[in-house]
Amino acid sequence: MKNIAVLTSGGDAPGMNAAIRAVTRSALAKRVSVHGVRQGYAGLIGGNLRPLGARDVGGIIQQGGTILGSARCPEFTTEEGRLRALRSLRQNDIDGLVVIGGNGSQTGAHALWEMGFPVVGVASTIDNDLYGSEITLGVDTALNIALEATDRLKVTAASHQRAFLIEVMGRDCGYLALNVGIAAGAEAIVIPEVETAPEEVAEEVRAAYERGKSHAMVVVAEGATYNASRLEQYFHENRKRLGFEIRTTILGHVQRGGVPSAFDRLLASRLGAAAAEQLIDSEPGVLMGILNGKVSATPLTDVVQSTKRTDPHLWQMARILAR
Ligand code: F6P
C-alpha cells in the first residue's frame, strides 16, 4: 500500500481529530502517504481530498470536532453514490481507506469493503451503540459534559425544591442517559431499553420528595418513548394533582462540542494507530474497537449485522442507589 485516505463521517465526536492525527502519523511512519477526505462520504463522492502531512495534523489532538469536516450523506446509501466514491478513490490512487464514525458510517465502510475496496473502521460515536467496541470515541467527553450540566442543574433544583428533566443524546440507545443518571445520582432515569410510563416517573419524583429530598433529577434519553418534551407535557397537564414543579433542559448538541477528555484522546490515538497498521500490514474489512480492555478488530460484516445492548441490570442498580 502506498497511499491511504482517512475520513470522518456522521455525528462528530470529541477525539476524532486525535484519531486523524494517529492514522496520519502512523501511516507516514510506514512510508505510506495519506489523504484527508473533506466532509465524509460527500467529499469522497465529490473527489474532495487533500494530502495530509505530519504538520497538517499538528496542534489538533486537543480540539473537539473534526478538521476534515463531517456529513450525513444520503447519496452514499445509493449504489450510484458508492460507485462514484469508488471512482474517486481510484482516480486519486488511494489503496485503502480509514473510516472514523458510528453505525451509519461503518455501514458505508462495509459497503465499500463488499465492493472490493480495503477499508478499516474506527469506532467513533457519542452514542456508544456500535457493536465491536465496549466504548467508542467521544463517549467519555460527552458523558462528562452531560454530567457537569446535570450537577449544575441539581444545585438550582435544590434551591427551589424543583424537579428537573434533563434530556441527553444517544439516538435509540440509553447508554449516555443511564451512565449520566448513575454518575449524577439522578432520582429517575428514562431509557428506550426500559419502557417507562409518565406516571411511573411522577411516582419516583413524588417518592423522592417524600424521602426528604430537596430536588428530583430525572435523566431522559432522547430516544425514549416518553422523551423530555412528552414527559414535560404530561407533568404540566397534571401539575395540580402531582403537586410539584418541573423544569426541562435539553442538552442536545452541547454534548458533542467538547474538548476531548484524556480518555478520548488516548482511545483515539490507540484506535487510529491500530487502524493504520491493520489497513497497511494486516487484514482490512474490520472495525477497530476496544474489547475486554484491548484494541481488537471485529469484521465489519459482524458490526453491521449486530446490535450492542445496554445492560438493563445497571438501570435496576441506579434505582436502588437513588433511594
Ligand atoms: O449519533 C450521534 C448523535 O449526536 C445522536 O446522539 C443524535 O441523535 C444525532 O447524532 C443528532 O444528529 P444531527 O447532528 O444530524 O442532528
Image (spheres, rainbow, N blue to C red):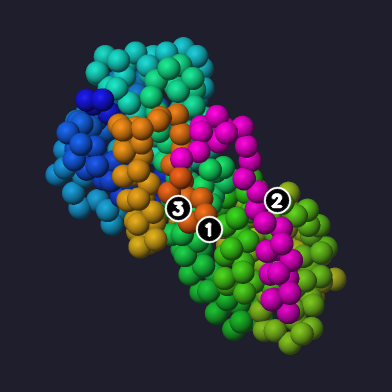
Outermost residue on the right side: it is 241
Q: In which quarter of the image is residue 41?
A: top left
Mark closer to the chain start, 2 or 1:
2
Separation (CA) of disc 3 from disc 2: 29 Å
Q: Which residue is drawn at 22% across and 43% down?
A: 25
Binning the other alpha carbons within 10 Å of mark 2 as few (below 14), some (14 to 19) or many (20 upward) gives many
Q: Which residue is drawn at 47% across and 65% down?
A: 144
Q: Mark 3 points at which residue?
A: 294
Q: Which residue is drawn at 57% across and 76% down?
A: 154
Separation (CA) of disc 1 from disc 3: 32 Å
- Per the rendering, the mark at residue 251 is 1
Residue 314 image point, x, y percent: 68, 64
Q: Is residue 318 magenta?
A: yes
Binning the other alpha carbons within 10 Å of mark 1 as few (below 14), some (14 to 19) or many (20 upward) gives some
Q: What stretch is highlighted in magenta?
A: 297-323
Q: Are marks 3 and 2 in contact (CB under 8 Å)?
A: no
Separation (CA) of disc 2 from disc 1: 17 Å
Q: Is 148 on the left or on the right of 273, as rendered? A: right
Mark closer to the chain start, 1 or 3:
1
Which residue is at the front of the view, 69 or 93? 93
- Per the rendering, the mark at residue 136 is none
Q: Mark 2 points at which residue?
A: 192
Q: Which residue is drawn at 39% across and 61% down?
A: 263
Q: Is 54 on the left or on the right of 196, as rendered? A: left
* Image: 180 above or below 93: below
Query: What amino acid is found at the position of numbered circle 2 in the picture?
Result: Pro
* Image: 218 above or below 21: below
Discs 2/1, front: 2
Where's the C terminus, which quadrant? bottom right
Residue 142 image point, x, y percent: 47, 58
Which residue is at the front of the view, 131 or 35? 131
Query: What amino acid is found at the position of numbered circle 1 in the picture?
Result: Leu
